[in-house]
Image: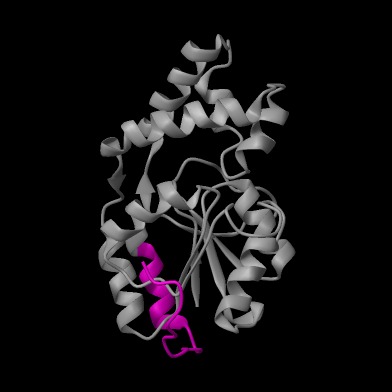
Amino acid sequence: MLLLDLDGVLVDTRPVMECAWLRVRETHGLDVPFEAYEHHLGRPFADIMERLGIGDAELIHRTYADASTAASHLTRQFEGVAEVLHAFAAAGWLLGIVTSKPLDRAAPLLARLGVPFATVRTPNGVGRGKPAPDPILLALIDLGADPADATYVGDMAVDQEAAHRAGVAFVHAGWGYGRPSAPTPEIAESPADLLRFLETAVHRAPFLEGSLL
């Protein structure tokens, strides 16, 4: 089973996030560079605001969300991502998404991939956000799967921590936005590099219908 983050793993939304953060700075008079925001990607928005020492997180999130939606046309799939996901699906792997992006903004991006995801976990559901293990564990519950049979692909240190706390193998997406933390995990240098798991995996699960997008 393959669980994946969205931003920085399947799609490049950095230009969208930069535009949205610029709108936040202009609208709310903040002097916080995008790089400071980017450093905390993968955490829930309110958590990022707290770490940046910014109040009115809900109001700022509305501004950010509106600007993100307006700039969504800047999103690009990473090269080879759709083909890789289709290869895993064709081989009988369960595919799931665990992301900190709200469902209303994640769903259109996932639909463009044209891949059946058996579960999609976002901050709209129950539980704590990454780096807590909750969203990964809830995805496993959705699929009736054991942590030992799952791998989570992410690009930020919070993804790695969440996978570790969930007891799930982690692969760092080397083409994404962040760097792995210690101990150094397995690293995939490109989406196509993930295909080697098709050759080495010994467990294959049948496809289950779930929260398909």
In the image, residue 141 above or below residue 82: below
Q: What stretch is highlighted in magenta?
A: 193-213
Q: Residue at x 36, y 76 (%)?
A: 88
| Total tally of numbered discs in the picture | 0
Measured as percent of width and height from the top left, residue 75 is found at 30, 41
Measured as percent of width and height from the top left, residue 78 is found at 31, 50
User: Horizontally, is 5 left or right of 132 in the view?
Assistant: left
User: Horizontally, is 61 left or right of 9 in the view?
Assistant: right
Look at the image and say whether residue 207 sits in the magenta stretch: yes
In the image, residue 69 above or below residue 56: below
Measured as percent of width and height from the top left, residue 72 is found at 32, 38
Q: Quadrant of residue 132?
A: bottom right
In the image, residue 95 above or below residue 191: below
Taken as a whole, is the magenta stretch helix, strand or loop?
loop
Q: Residue at x 62, y 65 (%)?
A: 136
Look at the image and say whether residue 6 sits in the magenta stretch: no
Q: Which residue is drawn at 51% across and 23% down?
A: 34
